[in-house]
């Protein structure tokens, strides 16, 4: 996996999710005609009850998922935390459930883990972790906002973050709940 570029890694994740959805008996299709992304939706899926899901797939080789949003969406023009603006942005950008794919192993023997969150769960997780990141850290200088927002894989298993000298404790809003292979989350609000 060392040589795979970001676009191809994303396509690999999308096709792995598509395969899983088909194996689960859903009707599904990738929305992208190339490895270039259609913004906010990667797969359309329909279940046996004729419910549709517009799925965003996020793929990583690391222990965190880049959500594709910067901290600036949660800051006002003066650099102060503005959670309402961040929430409003997330609600406009996130249109459906997410499937996050962690790829480990080698090119010859890749190992895929799937984490599935409903739209509301994704928004809640990003909002709450961003509130913590922007408000509960001891920073020597102000945050410029250009950095990306990430979700840690341990958070997708329901873990929080213990306090240390740099920040307060973060209590995961889904403490004790694992999102691994929770495909039913595609169909909840």
Image (tube, rainbow, N blue to C red):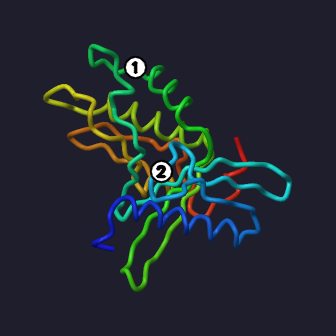
**Residue under numbered circle 1:** 82
Give the residue at the far front of this rendering.
33
Secondary structure beneath label 1: loop
Looking at the image, which is closer to me, 133 or 144? 144
Mark 1 Cα shell of 10 Å, populated few (<14), some (14-19), many (≥20): some
Give above or below for 67 relative to 4. above
Picture quadrant where residue 79 is located: top left
Reply above or below: 148 against 44: above
188 with respect to 155 (left or right): right
Image point 44% across, 23% down: which residue? Answer: 83
**Left or right: 174, with 75 as reference point:** right
Q: Residue furthest right?
A: 49
Q: Quadrant of the N terminus?
A: bottom left
The foreground one among 152 and 35 is 35
**Mark 2 and mark 1: span between their CA atoms?**
29 Å
Give the number of the mark in front: 2 or 1: 2
Going by the picture, which residue comes out furthest to the bottom?
108
Q: Please give the name of the residue rendered at 42% of the width and 38% of the height, measured from the top-left corner.
A: 129
Percent x, y of residue 85: 45, 20
Residue 164 at x, y percent in the picture: 25, 44
Give 35 or 116, whichever is nearer the viewer.
35
Determine whether the residue tagged by mark 2 lies in a helix, strand or loop.
loop
Label 2 or label 1, whichever comes before in sequence order? 2
Residue 124 location in percent, x, y?
54, 37
- Residue 125 numbered tag: none
Report the residue marked by disc 2: 37
The C terminus, quarter of image? top right
Q: Is residue 123 left or right of residue 103?
A: right
Near mark 2 (Cα within 10 A), the count class, few <14, some 14-19 or many ≥20, is some
Decide: is 36 above or below 22.
Answer: above
């Amino acid at each position: 996996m060392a040589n795979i570029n970001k676009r191809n890694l994303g396509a690999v994740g999308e096709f792995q999710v598509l395969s899983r959805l088909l194996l689960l008996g859903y009707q599904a299709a990738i929305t992208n005609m190339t490895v270039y992304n259609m913004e906010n939706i990667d797969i359309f899926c329909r279940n046996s009850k004729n419910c549709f899901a517009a799925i965003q797939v996020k793929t990583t080789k690391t222990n965190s998922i880049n959500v594709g949003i910067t901290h600036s969406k949660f800051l006002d023009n003066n650099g102060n935390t503005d959670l309402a603006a961040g929430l409003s942005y997330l609600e406009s950008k996130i249109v459906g459930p997410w499937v996050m794919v962690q790829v480990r192993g080698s090119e010859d023997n890749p190992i895929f883990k799937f984490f599935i969150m409903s739209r509301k769960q994704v928004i809640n997780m990003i909002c709450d972790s961003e509130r913590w990141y922007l408000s509960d850290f001891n920073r020597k200088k102000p945050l410029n906002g250009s950095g990306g927002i990430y979700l840690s894989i341990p958070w997708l298993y329901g873990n929080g973050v213990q306090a240390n000298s740099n920040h307060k404790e973060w209590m995961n809003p889904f403490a004790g709940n694992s999102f691994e292979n929770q495909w039913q989350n595609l169909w909840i609000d």
